[in-house]
Every structure is written in structure tokens, then in C-alpha cells.
Amino acid sequence: MIPTTTNINTVSETDSEKFYDMCMIERLCHNNEERIKKLVSVFIEQMPQSVEEIKQAYAKRDFAVVRKTAHRIKPTLSYYAIIKIEKDIQQIEKMAKGEVDTADMELKIIKLDIVVGEVVKKMKQDYFNN
Amino acid sequence: MKKKILVVDDETSICLLLENFLSLDYDVITINNGEEALVWLEGNLPDLIISDIQMDNMDGFEFLTKVRQRGFTKHTPFVMLSARAESKERIKCYQLGAQDYLTKPFNPEELEEVVKKNLFPIHYAMAW
């Protein structure tokens, strides 16, 4: 489905497609709750900053920074199994590299921003009760 | 004494993940860029280095090259860990002196085996 501002704004969590899944993170942290919480807090603090970097670089048409930042955060998004944007982040990186038409890059960046915002909100509820 | 692993990656989450995963069995030192890692290497000698490729200022290729140019770390096992999956990247890493190449997101079991293989080559070979 090609994202439009209409369907981007209806991003929501369903049972079949959760915002995130901690399975891999739990495994890598040997189920240590303290370490998991520390990682979640780093995600909450840094991922929105990285998305902001992408947004600002895109606004300046600085595609090198868009590509580099997308490439840097891509594995982290995979570890948290944020599947709603898994393909989008790959496409943002490719588009910024000039391999694909950049026509819908802006929509993908908007979607990335919205989904990361929702994930952060959900993580705060799940791990820090706020 | 635990073996010492140096992890170099500019993404804090990846450093933390590797530290969390490997620190049960090894001493793990994490550094966010190649330049700082080279400074750290002036006074320390790890048993294994795991490094990302894409980093600001000094990328993993340059870091690996400099590691290999230094006498003390000329033969230190080096594993490249990157989100780039292209074969040409792997070839370049091997040509520059990396022992192994893992793609992110890595499979924890594969990482564990690659680390063991490089830290304990004789024991590892004798296991089969």
C-alpha cells in the first residue's frame, strides 16, 4: 500500500501487528530486567532524536545525512521488531542513496516519525508507567 | 581471567546490546568511534575487536587498516559488524584483514560462535 497522509495518521496497534516486540532484546539481555529497562530508556531518548535528524536533513535536502542516519538506526528498529516501518526505513535509505525514486520519501519519513512516536509512548507506558 | 572484547559502534543501542549479550562471559569495552578506539588501543590490548563499518570521521575500513598497521594489534582478531549486506563490502573487509563479517541485525547464536571461534581457535577446531 502506498502511504498517504490519510492512512499514515491511522497508524495503530493491532494484535496481529504490534508496535514492537521485545523477544530479541530479551534474548540479548539474557532476560535481565534492569538491562532491558536501560536499553528501552536509551531507545526512548535517542530514537526520536535520530528521526528528527532525518527530518531536518530531508528539509535541507541533505540526502547524505538522511541515508547515513537511516542506515544507523535500521538495525535498532529491527532488534525491537518495529515491523510497521521495517521496509520504510530500508526504502528511505535507498531513496537517499539515489537508487529509488524519491517521490514518496517525505511520506515515509512522516510515517517513521509517527510510528516511532507511538512506540516511544507505548514503551513509556509499558516500562515506566507514564 | 575473562577475555577482553572491544566493541566500536556509533549507535549506542548496538553497543549496549553487544555489551549485555557478551558480558556474561567476556569483559566488554564499548567505544562510539574509531578515533577514540585507536587512542584506547594505545594503552590496551583486547583479545578481539568487533567494529561497525559506517561511522562518522573514521569508518570501519579505515579503523581496521590502522589496527592492522600497528604492531600490537596486527594479528588481533577483528570481526566486522555491519548493516551492509553486499558481498563487495565483505570482500573489502577480508582483504583489509578482518577475520569475519556479520550483518546487523545479527543472530545472537551466530555472534556467539564467531566470537568463540576467534577467541579460542584451537579449542573450537578440536570440538569437531
Image (cartoon, grey):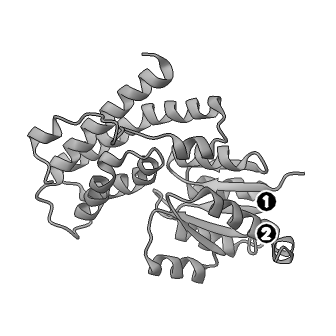
Rendered location of residue B111, percent (x, y): 64, 61
Q: Residue at x 43, y 75 (%)?
A: B86
Three-letter amino acid code of the residue under disc 1? Leu
Mark 2, other Cα within 10 Å: few <14 / some 14–19 / many ≥20: some
Q: Is residue B21 left or right of residue A68?
A: right
B37 versus A99 height, above or below:
above
B47 versus B11 height, above or below:
below
Q: Is mark 1 on a helix, strand or loop?
A: loop
Q: Is mark 2 on a helix, strand or loop?
A: loop
Q: Residue at x 44, y 67 (%)?
A: B84
Which callout, 2 or 1, points at the residue further toward the start of the chain?
Answer: 1
Disc 2/disc 1 C-alpha distance (Å): 7 Å
Host chain of mark 1 = B
Rendered location of residue A72, percent (x, y): 42, 53
Q: Which residue is drawn at 42% across and 16% down?
A: A130
Of the pair A90 and A46, the residue shown nearer to us? A90
Residue bearing mark 1:
B45
Tell me the tag on residue B72: 2
Three-letter amino acid code of the residue under disc 2? Phe
Q: Quadrant of residue A47?
A: top left
Q: Mark 2 near mark 1, Cβ–Cβ under 8 Å? A: yes
Host chain of mark 2 = B
Q: Residue at x 50, y 60 (%)?
A: B104
A43 versus B73 height, above or below:
above
**Is residue B44 among what the camera can see?**
yes
Q: Is residue B13 left or right of residue A101?
A: right
